[in-house]
Image (tube, rainbow, N blue to C red):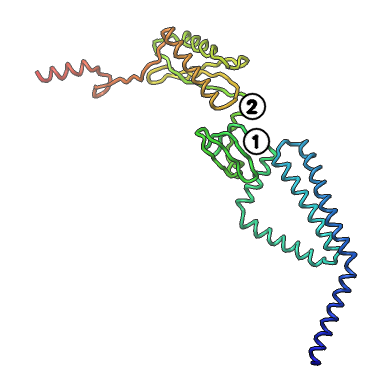
């Protein structure tokens, strides 16, 4: 019975001490709670003004949200650490910081690819080499940019297939942007017969392409003869259009091909079929009729 009374007295003393300590800490607890609330309100306000400030430097919504949320989290952490300091939990703050550093280092090694994609996404959001709606080519994929996140970029290729590419692969690879400058050049290769007048063929080709509607008139049509082919003299004609979409590009190319073909038919210019010359001589250069006559003579 005596031991039970001692145990009860010990518990009562401990409880009394804890109540006294709690009462003594009430002002600090109230101050810590106030710091947390003020820090939360300040974090929201700072995030709002940070996003407005960043919006004047870039129109990237992803970058604005990233910077705004980073500042928000930083202010929240400062408020929490200040509240812990008021409660005389400095060692706890130090332990938390040390643990966060060790965890961050371990996660950095474990998720190197994710970190690389994230950093690439941040840089891409700042530099903006691509935008939603643009036609781009990268990593053997060509498509319309549908979405840009901090880790991946989503394309819709020309067959309508969804393609998701890690930002690291885009950032470290060659990137083709067919839309950014607003104009695009169409190149068409064609061959004319060796018997045709090249000056006439050039004039007819240029007039045919200049008649194509929606061609940019402030960029003149260019034509260059490329060389002597197996069956034709090859040329390349070039003209510029607005880079609205890949469908528009293909349509303009098709119109130009039809215009050139119609003009050639009207002016009597030949686009030759492939021609092959058969040589039946042992040393080369012998005609077929000569070889046949020689074989016929040998039989008699």
**Would you identify the image quadrant in which residue 284 lies?**
top left
Disc 2 crowd rating (10 Å Cα; few below 14, some 14-19, many 20+) is few
Percent coordinates x, y for residue 64 in the rendering: 73, 41
Residue that label 1 marks = 129
Above-or-below relation of 48 to 159: below
Left or right side of 266 for 95? right
Quadrant showing the C terminus: top left
| Farthest front residue in view | 1
**Would you identify the image quadrant in which residue 36 lies?**
bottom right
Residue that label 2 marks = 181
| Farthest bottom residue in view | 2
Percent coordinates x, y for residue 15 in the rendering: 84, 77
Left or right side of 234 for 62? right
Percent coordinates x, y for residue 39 in the rendering: 83, 53
Give the Cα separation between the discs numbered 2 and 1: 12 Å
Residue at 72% x, 35% y is: 59
Residue at 66% x, 47% y is: 119
Instruction: Give the SS element for disc 2.
Output: loop
Instruction: Give the SS element for disc 1.
Output: loop
Left or right side of 164 for 80? right
């Amino acid at each position: 019975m005596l031991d039970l009374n001692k145990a009860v007295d010990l518990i009562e003393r401990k409880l009394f001490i804890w109540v006294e300590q709690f009462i003594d800490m009430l002002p600090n607890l109230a101050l810590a709670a106030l710091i947390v609330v003020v820090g939360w309100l300040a974090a929201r306000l700072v995030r709002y003004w940070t996003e407005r400030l960043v919006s004047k430097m870039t129109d990237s919504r992803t970058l604005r949200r990233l910077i705004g949320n980073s500042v928000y989290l930083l202010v929240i952490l400062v408020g929490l650490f200040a509240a812990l300091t008021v409660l005389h939990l400095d060692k706890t703050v130090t332990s938390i910081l040390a643990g966060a550093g060790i965890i961050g280092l371990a996660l950095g090694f474990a998720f190197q690819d994710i970190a690389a994609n994230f950093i690439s996404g941040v840089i891409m959001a700042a530099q903006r080499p691509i935008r939603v709606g643009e036609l781009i080519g990268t990593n053997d994929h060509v498509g319309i940019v549908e979405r840009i996140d901090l880790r991946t970029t989503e394309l819709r290729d020309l067959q309508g297939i969804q393609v998701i590419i890690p930002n690291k692969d885009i950032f470290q690879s060659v990137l083709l942007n067919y839309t950014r400058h607003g104009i695009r050049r169409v190149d068409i290769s064609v061959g004319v017969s060796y018997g045709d007048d090249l000056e006439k063929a050039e004039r007819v080709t240029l007039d045919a392409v200049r008649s194509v509607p929606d061609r940019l008139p402030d960029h003149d049509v260019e034509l260059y003869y490329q060389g002597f082919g197996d069956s034709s003299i090859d040329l390349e004609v070039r003209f510029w259009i607005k880079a609205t979409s890949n469908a528009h590009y293909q349509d303009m190319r098709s119109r130009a091909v039809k215009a050139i073909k119609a003009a050639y038919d009207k002016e009597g210019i030949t686009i030759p079929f492939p021609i092959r010359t058969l040589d039946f001589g042992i040393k080369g250069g012998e005609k077929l009729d000569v070889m046949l006559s020689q074989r016929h003579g040998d039989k008699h």
